[in-house]
Image: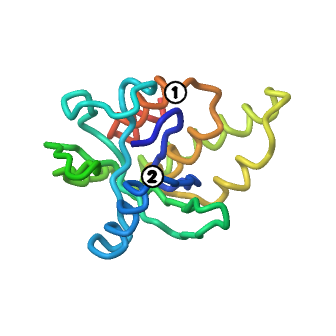
Amino acid sequence: LLKNMVLFPYNEIRIEFETDEEKKLIALAESCYDNKILIVNPKDTLEESPEIEELPNFGVVGKIKMKLEMPNGKTRIIILGESRARVFAYSKDEGIYEALFSVLPREEIPAKEEIAYVRALNKHIDVYVKEVPYMSNTIISQTSGINDIDKLTDIVVLYLPINYERKLEYLKETSSTCRVK
């Protein structure tokens, strides 16, 4: 469960874990699931231990890229988002949530149409950077050379000034062409 921040495919997050359940989850991902973990965002971010019925039916499959044991007893990990996922069912065992899910397929778009979307979005990015005084050129360096509209839209969203709820709506949108709009 990830609260108050959203992991998107092609993006990274850094998290610190300190409870035994959290550390057990990391160990389980490492030993049984090729360092992969399903990240979901609960509807109620204030709820410490939400009921299974309250959990969302979508999330992001992420891969643990790095794990570091800190001197203070915490474990810091970096997770790279890989793909959107549809959740069919949850269970909870010894404080760890488990999910039955499937990875959502990427939208297939004709190559010429995808190139047009990429060019249009890159033009909007250039205008956005020039017109918004607090926007850095980092977004341009992050998106330079990307010709995959699915990847491009998921990287751009990090730089948009949108709230948590809007990010969740964006995450639910499986169509990259809809995300461009």
> In which quadrant of the rendered view does residue 124 lie?
top right
Horizontal side of residue 138 vs 94, given as left or right: right
Q: Position of residue 30 (x, y in %)?
A: 37, 73
User: Where 73 falls versus 32 (above or below)?
Assistant: above
Residue drawn at the location 73% of the way across and 55% of the way down: 141
User: Where 52 falls versus 71 (above or below)?
Assistant: above
From mark 1 to mark 2, how far is it between C-alphas? 16 Å
Quadrant into which the N terminus falls? top left
Q: Position of residue 179 (x, y in %)?
A: 44, 35
Q: Nearer the viewer, residue 45 or 40?
A: 45
Horizontal side of residue 167 vs 56, given as left or right: right
Q: Which residue is mark 1?
A: 164
Residue type pointed to by label 2: Pro
Disc number at residue 33? none
Q: Nearer the viewer, residue 135 or 74?
A: 74
Q: Nearer the viewer, residue 124 or 13?
A: 13
Residue type pointed to by label 1: Tyr
Disc number at residue 9? 2
Q: Position of residue 163 (x, y in %)?
A: 56, 23
Residue drawn at the location 51% of the way across and 69% of the way down: 65
Horizontal side of residue 41 vs 140, given as left or right: left
SS class, disc 1: helix
